Amino acid sequence: THTVVKKTSLTLLGLGAMGTALARAWLAAGHPLTVWNRTPARAAALADAGARVADSAADAVAANGLVVLCLLDDASLDQALAGADLTGKDLVNLTTCTPAEARARAAWAEGRGARYLDGGIMAVPPMIGRPQAGGYVFYSGPRAVFEEHRHTLGVPAGTTYVGEDTGFAALHDVALLSAMYGMFAGAAHAFALIREEDIDPTVFAPLLADWLVAMAPSVHLTAAQLSGGDYTKGVVSRLAMQVAGVPTFLRTAEQQGVDPQLIAPYFALMRRRLAEGGEDEDLTGVVDLLRR
Ligand code: FVH
């Protein structure tokens, strides 16, 4: 005999690139899905794939207890949900927002009789529905709500619960993406340095990628020092030595005709920390300078 597991039915508002990928993953896994999109044409292909297309956001919300939102930004939620009755609903908001917006949105939802979970998606659409791609979603808010829907939420991508504070998913999301943009900035500078030389960028790229991967674990030393409060503990490369090398980096940029605007602010902070007496530290002190 086979046990038939009933798949949770749910509603999804927002069928942009990400919303469509989420919808396809839930449909492929056999979840009854009601969808709505401001521009109805975007729902047509999903109707063919088995989704029920609601005529309005209010109708879509009324269809299920679990309502997932994947809209452009926080402001679009107000517009989409203006006429919807949220009483008794569980809202899961995967729209990128700030921590403060997430907390305010939770209070807004609770004031309308709904429970609220916030999510920050750490994936791009092609990673959705492909567990091997490594995409996942940060969730924060009431643990009970997360646990209740964990299985369904885990269908499109992995789930990582980061706490009862509703703002934490957005904070983790933005923190990781900010680090990513810092990495992109460094890579842009590196490519600019070699751009006019007889170096093939496609030959250079694997060297760059391997180096970034090799350096990534340095965040563990930073974390341990921030946690322990001693920024000289376990130092690998003294700040005094690193600052002594800064003119070499700036002169190289100048000689290669490259504007150092992406890395110069970081060098300025390293110099400031050295001037404050951080010569025996590594780079952790820069974190504190940013918070002043
Ligand atoms: N796509 C990505 O790579 C990233 C990966 C990480 C997470 N983000 C966030 O996911 C949210 C949705 O992103 P998206 O890629 O689906 O975005 P779009 O393709 O631009 O679709 C936007 C949807 O939002 C609807 N919408 C916009 N404004 C309103 C409004 N005022 N009222 C109702 N709906 C609205 C839009 O509808 P339409 O233009 O088709 O009518 C789309 O459904 C986002 O927070 C990313 O940061 C994605």
Image (cartoon, rainbow, N blue to C red):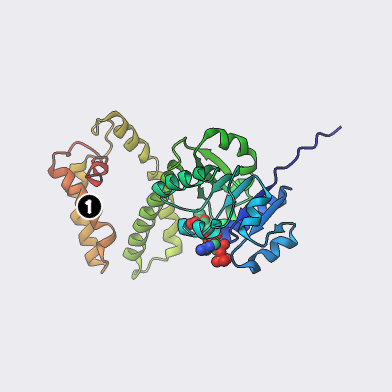
- In the visual, does 108 lie left or right of 92? left
| Percent of width and height locating residue 159 | 56, 41
- In the visual, does 142 lie left or right of 267? right
Q: To which quarter of the image does residue 275 belong?
A: top left
Q: To which quarter of the image does residue 165 belong?
A: top left
- Visible in this render: residue 59? yes
Q: Assign the N terminus to one quadrant of the image.
A: top right
In the image, 155 versus 71, the foreground residue is 71
Q: Residue at x 25, y 62 (%)?
A: 260
| Percent of width and height locating residue 255 | 23, 66
Q: Which residue is mark 1?
A: 267
Which amino acid lies under the numbered mark 1 shown in the image of this protein? Phe
In the image, 63 versus 151, the foreground residue is 63
Q: Assign the C terminus to one quadrant of the image.
A: top left
Local crowd size for mark 1, using a 10 Å CA cut-off: few (<14), some (14–19), many (≥20): some
Q: Residue at x 46, y 48 (%)?
A: 105
In the image, 189 versus 86, the foreground residue is 86
| Residue positioned most to the top | 228
| Percent of width and height locating residue 234 | 28, 31
Q: Residue at x 43, y 50 (%)?
A: 210
| Percent of width and height locating residue 81 | 55, 56
In the image, residue 230 above or below residue 200: above
| Residue positioned most to the right | 1
Label 1: element kind: helix
In the image, residue 164 above or below residue 135: above
The tally of labels here is 1
